[in-house]
Amino acid sequence: MKKIIYSLFVLAMAAFTFSSCEDVPAPYDMPTKPETPELSTDGTEANPYTVADAKIAATGTNVFVKAFIVGYVPDKALNEAIFSDAASAEKAPTNILIAASADETNVTNCMPIQLPAGAIRTALNLKDNPGNLKQEVILCGNIENYFGATGLKSVAYAKIGAKEFGTKPGGSTTTPDTPSTGKGSASDPYTVAEAIAAIKAGAPTYEVYLTGTVSEIDYYNDQYKSLSYYISDDGKSKDMQVYSGKGLNGADFTSKDDLKVGQKVTIKGIIKAFNKNGTDIMEVDKNSTIIKIEGEGTGGEVTPKPDTPDTPSAGEGVSIDGTTVTLTNSKATAGESVTLNFADQGFENAQEIKTVTLPDGTTVTFDANGNKNTPKFYTATKGVRVYANSILKFEGIKDIAKIVMQCDSYSGTKYVGNETATITFSGKTATYTNIFTGTTGGGVQLRVQTIEIFYAK
């Protein structure tokens, strides 16, 4: 009897439980994984990825990307991006930044592109091609991590404007070789006039041969062992500049005296127009090679330059030892000093620097001197970058006898300013100018980390 009563009790409880469950609300929907945004492009040649879609895709081989060139990364950190051309950089950057808008200045909206050595880097880098800034470009490469972000590496093909460089996947090389016959070949080199006409008609992207007579030796670059000089057909005018060229058969130059005005030279190199302050300068691009030199040089008859104000002798009072730049006032004896360490000033990364006051009241003022790239502090290099022709003005509490600047080095380059930099002293004031005399590029930056100012005894 007890067993029967117990069984009935269990059945009643079960019925109550099931009826109670009917009043329990239905379970809420379980959360699901967020959906991946749909791509509007597919990375093919016919429908290249946008920057946004390339970032969503995050991986891919031989994909096409289409965007605008907006800047470059000068060192190792993406947050040091420079949104301008690299005309004042000491050497051509090996990358560019692209974005959906030509006016983009937020690095998070950009995609870094690694430029391989060769025709593509030569054609796209922003030092040799400042006019590429804000131009639309189509690239083909592999989506990979670059500068800690989604980037494009192993770029095999590029198109900017109507010009194509490199090789499309499965296609043939689009950049032609140096011609073996016809105008611009070794057997029939351009005259200077013909080379200029070829540039104006749409400069070839490959190396050509041309012959001209040296009309002026402009500048010897000790770092690259190269010469910048001018040539013309008559040897009397500066019709075309050979920028940072190499010597006979690619040999290093050792001084300005290695080449003479009046000598006839046959050169192999890339010819182009370089725009400086709105004026096109016809030039043979850097790293050209002299194939033949004829004559001993006569001294020539160069069209005189307009009169210009005198400037201090190049390098006078400026000495460089490793990464130390010393500015010396020969009319004063150094005594007590005061030191400025830029890493201790609390500056933010990429902060523009104007005037810094030392502990005793002496000031250092940075002046871009009309340049687009202004002096800025970078945390990675712990110093301030001073570009071509920029000025440092020192205002002391006493007469200044000497200034010692410790500078940065990176990848074998010592960033100690140009050899042609100048210093002038006038009592309590000293003015340093990172003078650059070339017509393209900007020579060597001054990346100053500390400054010690010595007062006169």
Image (tube, rainbow, N blue to C red):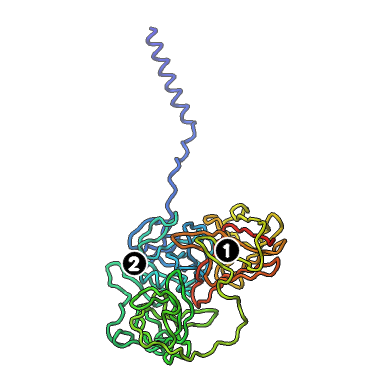
Q: Which corner quadrant holds the N terminus?
A: top left
Instruction: Tell me which residue sits at (46%, 36%) in the image.
Output: 27
| Identity, as a three-letter code, of the amino acid under mark 1 | Thr
Q: Nearer the viewer, residue 122 or 236?
A: 236
> Mark 1 packing: few (<14 Cα in 10 Å), some, or many (20+)?
some
| Identity, as a three-letter code, of the amino acid under mark 2 | Ala
Q: Is residue 247 visible?
A: yes
**How far apart are labels 1 and 2 at the CA level?**
45 Å
Instruction: Tell me which residue sits at (53%, 76%) in the image.
Output: 437
Residue 293, image x, y percentages: 36, 84
Indicate which disc, 1 or 2, sits on the residue closer to the N terminus: 2
Q: Nearer the viewer, residue 348 or 56?
A: 348
> Splitting the image into 4 quarters, where does residue 288 fall?
bottom left
Residue 194, image x, y percentages: 39, 89
Instruction: Tell me which residue sits at (55%, 87%) in the image.
Output: 305
Labels 1, 2: front one? 1
Q: Seen in the image, is 154 located left or right of residue 68?
A: left
Q: Seen in the image, is 347 located left or right of residue 53?
A: right
Instruction: Tell me which residue sits at (31%, 77%) in the image.
Output: 176
Q: Residue furthest top?
A: 1
Q: Element under label 1?
A: strand
Residue 368, image x, y percentages: 60, 69
> Splitting the image into 4 quarters, where does residue 294 fall?
bottom left
Question: Label 2 belongs to which residue?
Answer: 156
Q: Nearer the viewer, residue 101 or 432?
A: 432
Residue 149, image x, y percentages: 44, 55
Q: Element under label 2?
A: strand
The mark tally for this picture is 2
> Mark 2 packing: few (<14 Cα in 10 Å), some, or many (20+)?
many
Q: Is residue 197 visible?
A: no
Question: Label 1 belongs to which residue?
Answer: 326
Identify whether 212 is placed above or below 139.
Answer: below
